[in-house]
Amino acid sequence: MLRILLILLAPLLLLLMLEAAFEIGIWEPLAQPMSHAGTSVRLKRALSDPAIPRIDYVTIGSSRPEYGIDHAMLAATARQVGRVHANLAMPGSHWLTIGLLSEWLQRAHPEVRGGIIALSIQDLINPGNGSYELGIVQPFRHLGDIDEVTAHVDFNRNDVATYAIYSALFGWRADIREFVRHPYARRKTINWFNANRPASITLFENPESHGDMCAFGLDALSACDKVEASTDPERDGLKRQCKELRGGAASRPDFASLRQQHPLPDFMQRTRDVVQAQLRSTPWPEPPLVVLMPVPRIWTHDVLGPGLHEWALAILAPLADEGRIQLIDATGFFDADGAAECSAFFDFYHQNALGRERFMRWLLPQVQRFLHHAESSPPIPIERKPLRP
Amino acid sequence: MLFNSFQFIIFFVLVLALNQPLKRWPMAQKMMLLAASYYFYGQWQWHYVLLLWFSTIVDYTIGLRMARTRHPRRLVAISVIVNLGFLAIFKYANWLIDTLNFGAAAAGSAFHITPLDVLLPVGISFYTFQSLSYTIDVYRGVLPPRKNLLDYALAVAFFPQIEAGPIVRAREFLAELDGDMHVAFDDVKRALVLIAFGYVKKLVFADNLALIADPVFDHPAAHGFWDSLLAVYAFAFQIYCDFSGYTDIAIGCALLLGIRFPQNFNYPYAAQSIQDFWRRWHMTLSRWLRDYLYIPLGGNRKGRARTYANLMTTMLLGGLWHGASWNFVIWGGLHGAYLSFERAVLGRWRWWNADHPAAAALRVVVTFHLVCFAWIFFRAREFSHSSVMLANLSHPSLATFHAGEHGGTALLVSALLVAQLIGAYLHYKDRIAASRGPLLALALAAAILAVIWFSPATTAPFIYFQF
């Protein structure tokens, strides 16, 4: 019987050892640099670079602030007052990433004083961004955070991606599968990033963005009719976004009426409680500057549920009143532009360089006042470098 | 309940936990295994358990009465009619009706029969053959009728085999029950290796190969030569990994419960002839067809023409056993033709049969491609799809090969074929099962890891469940 038990336990022990190795990051040097987890690894390595001895402020958030905020400008203006402001915004980041990344920062860079948490009203519908956010947070996780993760992402027995909640072996599954399919391409990409993306670029530069949406418009869902009619393969990304837009438009919860319910629907209660608890326990000495990023009208008019904007403010405003956060609501920033809004975005989600510049003209003085504690100064011209291999 | 479900894993662990202490009371142990088997089968469609009971009671009673009657032939005929009758109603009636309706419509007749509203009971083809083997063996006098209904019911319904085999003959199974059902340490090692490799074959290989083969076979007109060729190769290994994976898990689970099942696969793509292929592929079905159909038909004892006719009949019926479709008939017919051609022509070619590595390699390659050709008809959903696949394959062009698109699949199927050839000589599963602790632990851990990392997000049911 003992021999049988040994035979059963020995492979499990080996797997536990491998799990531990993956928990401490054995796979990180091999991660696909452009995947969700790989982007996190690049950030982690940049933040651990001896060339970056100190960080005072950070910007955390999704791809909307990644493209919509001028990180080079923020870094330069912070530098003027002797501070270091790093960009940690990543595509797909949501409240889970914000929580675990800020906790990891607290351990790796306890000197961080505060930062910008930038998302959009859409990110206040649910407490998590689905199972794929597990990939983003994998490099920042530790064994004791399972409760925190399950507050944001539900375990689903039929969704193997959610097994990553409990196991790093599952957390790296997608990355390993892709590695096995294209090992040589992976090696080339990693080498390219190692050679061309020092920490200074990763943390203090802007990603590249091209084009605008004026050929389609950003006012109404009819823009998607034009996108879908296009035969240009370059528009495939927009077509994918249109699928998401149409999916959202098909199920628009009416937040105005849902807010009247007693008790509130479970998902709303959960979102409010998780977000408020998280922002109340932000591990920085200074209250974070929470920025609700600009959202094109197509979202607020045709896709997102009515009353969502007010619901988002209902979650965040009490925290601002308590002094736990500084709140900047830029949701309708480009609304006043009317037809010109289309010139500020390069797809249905993200601002282009022009949109970023216009937005920063408005945002920067507030960042300087609330965060960098400096007198506002004119924007500093930044040298642009390409960011994609 | 599928082997590749959490439900089954929990179920099997519970059965194992109950089986161990009950070994001291064989009757209670068998009752528990029978109850577990009915529960397992009933998870799919509980009322088809009644069908299983009926079939069991009929054959059990016939077995007992055959010992006392002067007309055993009539009784065995009743058994054959009842068993094959169920099979005909549930599996072939709608196919025949559709064929008749199609023929009538083609002839411009208004004749139409409404198809029956029946669902094919899972595993009916398998347990029907197992049950028939009992009454036929009793009739032949090679097996005494079993007085203990519990033993016989368990032989028919034993859960590791009921849904997709292996086709364990009643006399083999009953002999196991008559033994001590002892599970030695080496049995546990072997069972664990079989189960682990079975899951790897199914979840890692078969399910991923399905992602390559399915889109092409489902929409062949949208694909060209290389897509189609690689889809055929991919399906060849998909069905092997799927079915032999299931069998490995079944054999492993049975072994842990103290029952030894016969081998069902022996590296079939390393076969050097179609006859050799059938000695390696679904071996329990081949044996059944040989012993209960081919030999009673006369086998090869009644002249050449009759031998070929017997081969063709056996393989056509073997094809039809898989499913009610003309494509399965063509598949069986092709194998019947291959076997006849081998016997009539290839057997006489000295160079073909030369004992030389190059000749052996040529035989393996040719056999593999003949088998793959027949798989086209087996896999295609409709006859028209197989025609389109054949049309795609009739326009070979090196220029349309794109390394990025086709290279990975080509490499994968080549590696799997090489693994078959090496496996046929090394028998690595047996070696690992016989190895000492560290290597075994490493192999089991690697198998679990392969399932964690490389199984697709969604898994498909086992292919042979539909038969």
Image (cartoon, coloured by chain):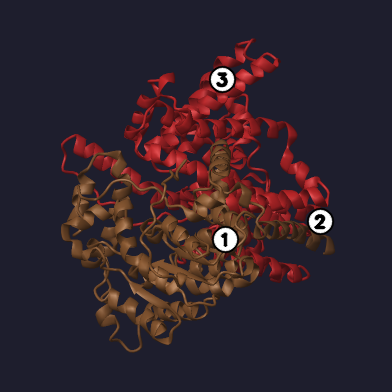
Secondary element type, mark 1? helix
Quadrant in the picture for residue B60: bottom right
Q: Are marks 1 and 2 in contact (CB under 8 Å)?
A: no
Judged left or right of residue A47, residue B86 is left
Residue in the image at 44% along x and 55% along y: A72
Quadrant in the picture for residue B148: bottom right
Secondary element type, mark 2? helix
| Crowd class of label 2 (few under 14; some 14 to 19; many from 20; radius 10 Å) | some
Q: Is residue B408 above or below residue A282?
A: above
**Chain of the residue under label 3:** B
The chain drawn in red is B
**Residue A91 in sight here:** no
Judged left or right of residue B98, residue B32 is right
Judged left or right of residue B427, residue A27 is left
Q: Which residue is mark 2?
A: B185
Q: Is residue B343 above or below residue A10?
A: above
Quadrant in the picture for residue B452: bottom right
Secondary element type, mark 3? helix
Color of chain A here? brown
Residue A93 in the image: x percent, y percent? 45, 62
To the question of a shared chain for discs 3 and 2, the answer is yes
Residue A127 in the image: x percent, y percent? 43, 73
Q: Nearer the viewer, mark 3 or mark 1?
A: 1
Judged left or right of residue A111, residue B337 is left
Q: How far, Cα to Cα, is label 3 from label 2?
A: 44 Å
Q: Which residue is mark 1?
A: A138
To the question of a shared chain for discs 1 and 2, the answer is no
Given residues B361 and B440, the one toward you in this image is B440
Residue in the image at 53% along x and 52% along y: A200
Q: Which residue is mark 3?
A: B342
Q: How far, Cα to Cα, is label 1 from label 2?
A: 40 Å
